[in-house]
Image (cartoon, rainbow, N blue to C red):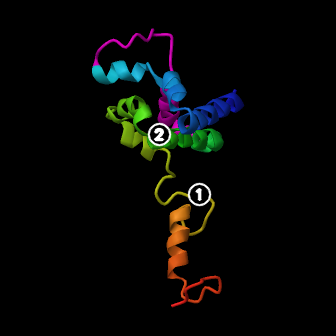
Amino acid sequence: APATARAAAAFITAAAARQPLLAESLLLPSKLSSLAGGGGTGVKEEESSMLDSLWECLGEAGEMRASDPRMLAAAVGALVALWRGGRLLGGAVATLRSQPTLVSRLEGCLPPRGGSSGSSGGSVLVARKRDKDDEADDDEDDEDDPDDPNPT
């Protein structure tokens, strides 16, 4: 069922971006909420939410990186979408942030230091997606723009 799990992660990613209230309803209540707060959340022991599933993926990041890196990427992508979701996804983000092992689980998603990731340099290149504001700033800096009606 790895394809189904990846599809579920893609669904929660899309929901977080376009329908945050739907995403929140799939993420909470969570078993993690009861672990963090010590109180009852209304979640039965045999039930789990999407947030619980994403948390489990983070806990198995080392194995997933080797056996199913696409699933790990989908899970991390879903978490990124949650973080970018703003106030409407604040409950899910707060639940994650309350977990004492969050940072170590996120670190588990990264390749080990000095490990062989298929590249000889061992470094990671991170590219930033340019947005329209960046392009507008670049256009302002073009002194020799032939389309500029007011050349400087």
Q: CA distance from mark 1 to mark 2?
A: 31 Å
Q: Is 149 placed above or below 44 here?
A: below
Residue flagged by tag 1: what amino acid is it? Ser
Q: Which residue is mark 2?
A: 85
Residue flagged by tag 2: what amino acid is it? Gly
Q: Where on the picture, by quarter, is residue 125?
A: bottom right
Does residue 28 appear to the left or right of 36 in the view shown? right
Of 107 and 136, the residue lying toward us: 136
Of 40 and 86, the residue lying toward us: 86
Does residue 126 appear to the left or right of 119 in the view shown? left
User: Which residue is found at the position 55% from the left and 39% from the top?
Assistant: 17
Write the start and end of the magenta stretch as one range.
38-64
* Badge nearest the viewer, 1 or 2: 2
- The secondary structure type at the circle numbered 2 is loop
- Residue 43 at x, y percent in the picture: 43, 12
Q: Which residue is mark 1?
A: 117
